[in-house]
C-alpha cells in the first residue's frame, strides 16, 4: 500500500513539475511574445478587404503592384476560389513571423526588433492594399449597388428572405452602405477605409508588441515604436508613390477644368494615367475624360460613356443604354462593359418589380454575359427563373449552384438555396427541397438573424 502511495505521489509530482514548466514557458516573456507573433499569422492570412457580395480578399491574394505578369483587375481576380500569390503582401509578413519565432527562441533580447520590423512592413502592406488597386474598390462600390438590385429581386420572391429584410454584411460589421455615403462619396483615397478588415489590426498588434517587449521607461518605448512606425510610413509612401502622384495630377486637372482650361486639364489627366496606368481601367477616369471631351465637343468613346453615365444618374435607362451600347463589344474595356451591365441590371430590376419575369430573365442574363466577373447578375437571373418557372429548378441547380463559392454574402447564398428549395417544394420534389433548406441553414443561421424562411421550409417537410 505504501508503494502504491509513493507511486501516486511520484506521478503527481512529475505531472506538477511538467505542468509548471509548460505554464512557465508559455506565460514567460518569451512565450507570450511568441504567442503574440504567431497570432499575427491569423491576421496576415485572414480577410483584408471585404466586398458586399463577392468573397473576401485575403492577404495572400493581394499583390504589391500590378506590374507583374497577371493584372490584378476585377474581371480577372473577382472569381473565387482565388490562388495565393508569391508577389502578395503576405509573403514578407509571413517570412518575418517565421524567422522572428526562431530569433526570439535564440536571442530573446532581439524581440522588440522583430516586432518593429513587422510593424515597419505591415504599414506599407496596408497602404498597398488600400491605394495600389483602385479598380478593386470601384468593383466593391458597384457591388453595393448590385446588392440593392438583389434586394428587389429577392423581395419579389418572398418578403421573409434575409437579403430582402436584413442589411448587407458591410453594414452588419459596422461598415459602409448608408444612403449619405452613396449620395456623397468620399475621396478615392479615403474610400477604401470602408472595406478594410484585418490590416489595421495587424498594425495594432505589431505596435503593441514593440511597446510591450521594449525595455526601459515608457517614453523610450513609445519613441522606439514611433521610430519603426515612421520607417513604415516612409516605406508606405514609397510603395504607393505612383498613386499619390497620380492623384496630385488628377486634382490639378480638376482645378484646370474648373477654370475652363480644358486642354490643359486633359493633359494633366493623361499625366495621371501615365503615372499609374491602372487608372485607365476606372469608370472614374472614363467619366473625367468623357466630361472633358464633351465640354470640348469631341466625339469619342469616352464622351459616350460620360453621357450614358449621366443618363443613368438621372434614371433615364433607355437613353443611357442607347447612348453606350453601340460602343460596347466583346473586346471593349472593362469600364464600358461594367457600365452597360449596370444599366441593363437596373432595367432588369425594373422588370422584376413590375412582374415582367420573362423580360427580367433575359435582361439579367445579358448583364451576366457582359460582366461575367460579377456574381450579382447570375444570382438575380437564377432567382427570377425560379420564381417564374419552378420546374426549371434542376437546370438552375446544375448550372449555377456550384458557383456559390463566388458569393461571400451568406444572406445571398443562403437565400439562393432557399429559393431552390421553394421551387422543388412547389414541384413536389420534397427530398431535394429538404436538402436545399438544410443547405440554406448550413450557409447561415444565427440567433440575431434567424433564417426564418429556410427554418419554416424545413419544418414544413
Image (tube, rainbow, N blue to C red):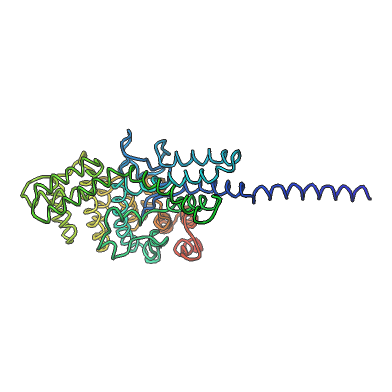
Say if residue 401 shows up in the picture.
no
Vertical side of 107 occupied by 384: above or below: below
The residue sitting at 38% across, 59% down in the picture is 170
Q: Is residue 233 left or right of residue 245?
A: right
Q: Residue furthest right?
A: 1
Say if residue 134 shows up in the picture.
yes
Residue 80 image position (x, y, % from top left): 39, 44
Q: Residue furthest left?
A: 297
In this rendering, the count of numbered labels is 0
Residue 154 image position (x, y, % from top left): 35, 60
From the viewer's side, name the closer residue of 165 and 286.
Answer: 286
Residue 385 image position (x, y, % from top left): 32, 54
Q: Is residue 231 left or right of residue 301?
A: right
Q: Residue furthest top?
A: 69
| The quadrant where residue 372 appears | top left
Residue 311 image position (x, y, % from top left): 15, 57
From the viewer's side, name the closer residue of 133 and 392.
Answer: 133
From the viewer's side, name the closer residue of 108 and 94.
Answer: 108
Q: Is residue 179 left or right of residue 171?
A: left
Amino acid at each position: 500500500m505504501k508503494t502504491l502511495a509513493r507511486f501516486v505521489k511520484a506521478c503527481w509530482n512529475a505531472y506538477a513539475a511538467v505542468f509548471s514548466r509548460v505554464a512557465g514557458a508559455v506565460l514567460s516573456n518569451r512565450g507570450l511574445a511568441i504567442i503574440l507573433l504567431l497570432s499575427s499569422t491569423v491576421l496576415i492570412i485572414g480577410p483584408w478587404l471585404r466586398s458586399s457580395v463577392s468573397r473576401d480578399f485575403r492577404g495572400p491574394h493581394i499583390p504589391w503592384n500590378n506590374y507583374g505578369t497577371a493584372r490584378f483587375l476585377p474581371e480577372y481576380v473577382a472569381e473565387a476560389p482565388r490562388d495565393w500569390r508569391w508577389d502578395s503582401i503576405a509573403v514578407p509578413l509571413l517570412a518575418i513571423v517565421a524567422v522572428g519565432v526562431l530569433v526570439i527562441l535564440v536571442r530573446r533580447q532581439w524581440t522588440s526588433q522583430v516586432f518593429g520590423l513587422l510593424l515597419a512592413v505591415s504599414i506599407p502592406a496596408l497602404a498597398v492594399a488600400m491605394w495600389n488597386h483602385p479598380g478593386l474598390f470601384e468593383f466593391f462600390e458597384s457591388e453595393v449597388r448590385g446588392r440593392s438590385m438583389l434586394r428587389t429581386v429577392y423581395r419579389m420572391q418572398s418578403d421573409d428572405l434575409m437579403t430582402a429584410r436584413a442589411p448587407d454584411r458591410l453594414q452588419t460589421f459596422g461598415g459602409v452602405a448608408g444612403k449619405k455615403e452613396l449620395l456623397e462619396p468620399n475621396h478615392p483615397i479615403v474610400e477604401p477605409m470602408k472595406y478594410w478588415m484585418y490590416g489595421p489590426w495587424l498594425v495594432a498588434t505589431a505596435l503593441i508588441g514593440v511597446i510591450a517587449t521594449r525595455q526601459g521607461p515608457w517614453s523610450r518605448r513609445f519613441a522606439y515604436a514611433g521610430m519603426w512606425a515612421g520607417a513604415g510610413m516612409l516605406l508606405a509612401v514609397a510603395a504607393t508613390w505612383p498613386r499619390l502622384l497620380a492623384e496630385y495630377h488628377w486634382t490639378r486637372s480638376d482645378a484646370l477644368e474648373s477654370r475652363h482650361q480644358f486642354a490643359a486639364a486633359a493633359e494633366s489627366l493623361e499625366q495621371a494615367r501615365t503615372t499609374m496606368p491602372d487608372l485607365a481601367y476606372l469608370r472614374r477616369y472614363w467619366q473625367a475624360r468623357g466630361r472633358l471631351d464633351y465640354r470640348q465637343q469631341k466625339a469619342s468613346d469616352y464622351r459616350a460613356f460620360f453621357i450614358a453615365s449621366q443618363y443613368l444618374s438621372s434614371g433615364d435607362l433607355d437613353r443611357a443604354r442607347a447612348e453606350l451600347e453601340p460602343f460596347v463589344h466583346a473586346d471593349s474595356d472593362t469600364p464600358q462593359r461594367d457600365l452597360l451591365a449596370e444599366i441593363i441590371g437596373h432595367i432588369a430590376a425594373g422588370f422584376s418589380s413590375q412582374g415582367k419575369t420573362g423580360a427580367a430573365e433575359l435582361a439579367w442574363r445579358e448583364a451576366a454575359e457582359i460582366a461575367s466577373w460579377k456574381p450579382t447578375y447570375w444570382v438575380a437571373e437564377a432567382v427570377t427563373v425560379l420564381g417564374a418557372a419552378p420546374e426549371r429548378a434542376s437546370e438552375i441547380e446544375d448550372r449555377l449552384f456550384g458557383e456559390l463559392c463566388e458569393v461571400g454574402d451568406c444572406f445571398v447564398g443562403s437565400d439562393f438555396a432557399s429559393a431552390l428549395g421553394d421551387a422543388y417544394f412547389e414541384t413536389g420534389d420534397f427530398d431535394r427541397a429538404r436538402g436545399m433548406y438544410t443547405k440554406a441553414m448550413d450557409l447561415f443561421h444565427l440567433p440575431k438573424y434567424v433564417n426564418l424562411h429556410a427554418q419554416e421550409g424545413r419544418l414544413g417537410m
